[in-house]
Amino acid sequence: MTIAWDVIAVYAALAVWTALLVWGLRRQRITPFLLWGIGILLFLNVRYFIEGPPAAIAFFIGIYDVFDNLGLGRDEGAPALAECVNNACTVWGDRYVNHPSWGVAFHERFVTGTALRTNLLYVHIFFNSVAFVLLHHQLLRPATGSGRNRHRWIGRTAFGAVTLGTICAVALASEHGSVSEYGGQAAKYGFYSMAAFVYVTAVMGVVSIRRGDHSAHRTWMIRWAGSMWGSFWLFRVLLVFTGPLLREYETASLLISIWASAPLGIVIAEFFRRRSAARAHSKVNTLPLPERALSI
C-alpha cells in the first residue's frame, strides 16, 4: 500500500510546531512558533501553484484521511465519509477509500469546475498568504524612527492583499449554498462570517491609525492576526479532532470549523494581548521609582 511520505513529513512538522508552542509559552518567546506556523502555511499553499488545485486538495484530504478513518475497517464507512471517483482525491493510494465528504466535494469542484473558480482560488490563496506574512512583519517589527514610512507602506500592501483575498473568498463562498457536503446555506453564511471577522478587524486597524490612535491600532492588528490564524490554522486543527468524533453527522465537523475558527482566533489573540499588557504593567510597577518614571 502507498505511504504518503509528504503527509508524514507534515505530521512531523506539526509535532515540532507543538513543541515550539509549549517551549514558547514556558519561556514567553512565541516568535519561533509563529515563524514555524507561517512556514507550514506557505508549504501547504504553494502546492496549489506548483501542482494545481486537484493535486493540492488531494494532499490536503490525505492529512485528514488518517484521522477520519481511525477505528474503522478499510471498507467501513460513516455518514461523514464518502468515496471519490477512482479514489483520486487522496495521496494514500488504495490505503483509504473513504474520505471526509467535504473533502470529496472540495476535490470534485476543482476537477470539474470552471476556470473562473480555479482562478478565484489562486487569487484568494496568493493574496491571503501575502497578507498573512506581512501582518506578522508589522507586529514583530513595529514602526520606530526611520522605519515608520516602510511600516506604513507594508501595512498598506497587507491591507490591499487581504482586501483582494477576501473578495475572492466571498465570491467562492457564494457558490456553497448548493454544496450539501459542506452544509449548504449554513456553510455559505459561515464563510461570509469568517470573511467579515477577518476584514472588519483589518479595517478597524486602519481606521484607528488614521485617527492617530497607535494603541488601538496595535490592538486591532493583533485581533486581525488572531482572525487570520483562526481562519487558517484553527479551521484545520479543529477538523483533526471533530472529524473522527463527529463522523456520524455529515456536516457537523466542517460547520464547527467554519463558524468557530475566526472568532475563536480573535478570542485567543485578545487573551494573549491582555496577558502581555498585564505582564508589562506589572514589570513597570516593580521598578524603582526613578526607573519607573523613565519607562512611562
Image: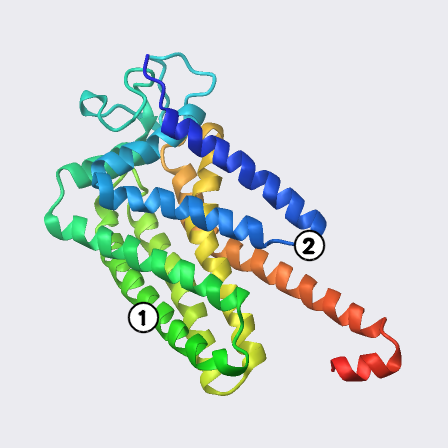
Residue type highlighted by circle 1 = Gly
Q: Quadrant of residue 243?
A: top left
Within 10 Å of disc 2 (Cα), the crowding (few <14, some 14-19, many 20+) is few
Spatial CA span between label 1 and label 2 = 32 Å
Residue 41 pos. (x, y %): 40, 47
> Height in image: 2 above or below 159?
above
Question: What label does residue 179 carry, if any?
Answer: none
- At 41% from the left edge and 59% from the top edge, which residue is drawn? 132
Q: Is residue 248 visible in this depiction of the protein?
A: no
Residue 91 pos. (x, y %): 30, 26
Q: Nearer the viewer, residue 2 or 151?
A: 151
> Height in image: 109 above or below 123?
above
Q: Quadrant of residue 253?
A: top left
Q: Secondary structure at mark 2?
A: loop
Residue type highlighted by circle 2 = Gln
Specify whether 53 is left or right of 139.
left
Circle 1 residue: 160
- At 42% from the left edge and 52% from the top edge, which residue is drawn? 231
Specify whether 244 is left or right of 268.
left
> Height in image: 104 above or below 275?
above
- Which of disc 2 and disc 1 is earlier in sequence? 2
Circle 2 residue: 28
The color scheme shown is rainbow
Q: Nearer the viewer, residue 122 or 220?
A: 122
Q: Quadrant of residue 164?
A: bottom left
Q: Among all residues in the image, which is located at the extreme front? A: 146
Specify whether 262 is left or right of 177.
right
Residue 12 pos. (x, y %): 49, 31
- At 85% from the left edge and 74% from the top edge, which residue is drawn? 287
Specify whether 223 is left or right of 128.
right
